[in-house]
Structures are given as C-alpha cells and as structure tokens.
Image (cartoon, grey):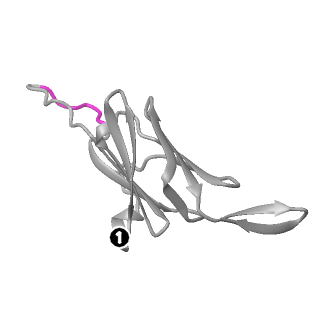
Amino acid sequence: MLEVRENNMAIYITKNTETPRYSQEHFVNTSRMRMPKVNVIDCDNEIMIKAELPGVSNEDIDVSVTNNILTIKAGLSKSASVERCYYYRSEIPQGSFSRSLSLPAEVDIDNSQVSFTNGLLDLRLLKINHVKHINGRERIET
C-alpha cells in the first residue's frame, strides 16, 4: 500500500488480489453518472495517469489496482438544501462515482507516486517489467 500525505490528508493506493466484479454501470456512462476525464501515458518505465476530480477532497478518493485494472472512486459532498427555492438548473454532480480502466502493463504499487493538487490526481505507477528498445531490438528489463 502506498500512502501520500498532503495537508494532513491521506490518499491510499492499494493492490487487491481479488478479481474485480463489474456491473454494467462500470462501462456505460449515463447522464446521472459523472465519469472523470483521464489521461493514461505509457512511458518506458512508468505509467502516468492524470484524472480530473474537481470538487473532491483528498479523504474522499480511493484508488486501487486489481489484476492491472485501475479503479478510481470518489465522492462529492451534497450541497446544502435550499429552503423555499428550487433549482432552475442543476449541472454540478453530487454523490459518488467510479472509473475503472485497464493498464498497459503490470505496475509496482509500493514504489509508485501519487499527488492531488487543485482537483487533479496525478499517479506515477512504476512498471514491474518494461520494454526498452536498444538498437531496434526489444529488451525486457525487470
């Protein structure tokens, strides 16, 4: 498990050994479900992941890796009820959401890095076995 503390708040990344069980909602985006925008960048020795999580605080983020599937779960606080008023327009999502995506390589969670600044989650996951191209030939490094 990797723990990163920022401003006395912790984000944990855990490696699960159980096979994840997914329902159809993990793969279908509906108008009620908020899916964070994610960039996955495959580098020589690491995988960089950037996820937009506006309005989410550190303690509401859960990141896990199970069988090379990264899952980001987070919750948004419900806004206070407004008495004698009604929403003319309501576009800011509330509640919790989850995003799962497959990783291009096996990663070492214990030696990875995580940061969360201004609503942007930045993960740097080190690859366990990575391929280097030397003189046109592939060489697997461990």
Q: Position of residue 69 (x, y in %)?
A: 46, 64
**Residue placed at 70% from the left, 55% from the top?**
44
Prevailing SS of the magenta stretch: loop
The amino acid at mark 1 is Tyr
List x then y, in percent, for residue 95.
Answer: 25, 45
Residue 21 image point, x, y percent: 33, 72
Residue drawn at x 36%, y 70% is: 20
Residue underneath mark 1: 22
Above or below, 26 against 97 in this view is below
Quarter of the rendering containing residue 77: top left
Would residue 121 appear left or right of 3 to someone viewing this image?
right
Circle 1 Cα neighbour tier, 10 Å, few/some/many (<14 / 14–19 / ≥20): few
Label count reads 1
Residue 80 versus residue 117: which sits nearer the camera? 117
* Segment tinted magenta in the rendering: 85-90
Write the residue at 37% across / 74% down. Answer: 19
Indicate yes or no whether the magenta region holds residue 80.
no
Question: Would residue 92 be seen by someone viewing this image from the given angle?
Answer: no
Q: Could you tell me residue 102's position as x and y percent?
A: 51, 64
Q: Is disc 1 placed on a helix, strand or loop?
A: loop
